């Protein structure tokens, strides 16, 4: 499986079978993304919540290949109301898709869409694909249940925000890594805008200081998992 980071909270997973799954694709309005929406396709789009910097260019991309949205019920219904396919789920629930298993977790955050629709609870997501477990926390503050998530899932890769202001900042994110105990922490949701400027190297040093591994992905970088 391959993981590509577009910057902000936007990732692309390409499974060993060639399925493409996007998470929170925010590209065209994202000053740090080296890739724009007309350059990519998706089979599935996983959304953590309805904020504009996560819903992003989802509809433009979904239109191209009739991609299916996977998200919590209210946000899924919002996508359906815009004419798209969606699989409605909710926090705590898991489902086996053809590419792997998806389970939604809590996230402490909001979920208002750019056109002012409230689309349920914000979420994080656990993805079990090709024998690996990825935990994309979505936008969230620190919460102690991350310990439970880590105890019940051997998280290989934890993708978590460090930009502060709207989400965890660096020190809370380090605590989140300690609680969840992933194989590798990957910082996200930083340096997109001045208000969320953060130094990923400071995060990496602090994560390593607690004996955990961290990888800073360059914007546009793709790695083999
Ligand atoms: Ni948000
Ligand atoms: Mn956000």
Image (cartoon, helix red, strand yellow):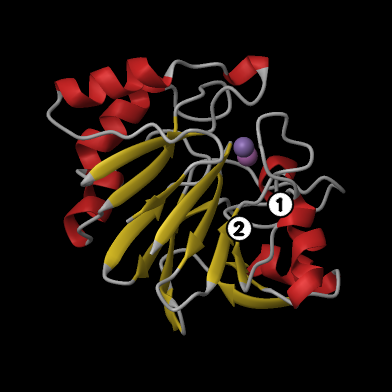
Q: Residue at x 57, y 50 (%)?
A: 122
Q: Is residue 217 positioned above or below 11 on the image?
A: above
- Estimate the x, y position of residue 49 in percent, counting from the top left: 62, 52
In which quadrant of the rendered view does residue 153 lie? bottom left
Q: Which residue matches tag 1?
A: 55
Left-right relation of 10 to 136? right
Task: Left or right? Give the position of 198 relative to 26.
Answer: left
* Residue that badge 2 annotates: 47
x%, y% of residue 175? 27, 29
Q: Residues within 10 Å of mark 2 (few under 14, many from 20)?
A: many
Q: Ligand 2 lies in which image quarter?
A: top right
User: Residue 88, position in %: x, y?
Assistant: 61, 75
Q: Quadrant of the C terminus?
A: bottom left
The reply to whether dot 1 and dot 2 touch (C-beta < 8 Å) is yes
Across and down, in percent, residue 98 comes to 46, 84
- Mark nearer the N terminus (1 vs 2): 2
Query: Image point 57% across, 37% down: which residue?
Result: 7
Q: Could you say whether the residue bearing mark 1 is in a helix, strand or loop? A: helix
């Amino acid at each position: 499986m391959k993981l590509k980071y577009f910057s902000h909270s936007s990732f692309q997973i390409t499974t060993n079978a060639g399925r493409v799954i996007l998470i929170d694709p925010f590209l065209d309005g994202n000053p740090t993304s080296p890739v724009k929406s007309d350059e990519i396709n998706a089979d599935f789009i996983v959304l953590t919540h309805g904020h504009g910097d996560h819903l992003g260019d989802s509809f433009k991309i979904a239109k191209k290949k009739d991609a299916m949205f996977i998200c919590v019920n209210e946000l899924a219904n919002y996508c359906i109301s815009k004419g798209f396919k969606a699989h409605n789920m909710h926090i705590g629930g898991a489902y086996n898709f053809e590419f792997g298993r998806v389970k939604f977790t809590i996230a402490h955050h909001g979920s208002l869409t750019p056109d002012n629709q409230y689309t349920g609870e914000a979420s994080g997501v656990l993805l079990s694909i090709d024998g690996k477990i990825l935990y994309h926390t979505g936008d969230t503050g620190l919460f102690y249940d991350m310990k439970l998530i880590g105890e019940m899932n051997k998280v290989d890769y934890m993708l978590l925000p460090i930009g502060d202001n709207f989400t965890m900042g660096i020190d809370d994110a380090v605590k989140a890594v300690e609680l969840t105990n992933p194989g590798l922490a990957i910082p996200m949701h930083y340096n997109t805008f001045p208000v969320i400027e953060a130094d990923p190297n400071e995060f990496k040093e602090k994560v390593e200081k607690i004996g955990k591994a961290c990888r800073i992905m360059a914007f546009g970088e793709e790695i083999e998992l």
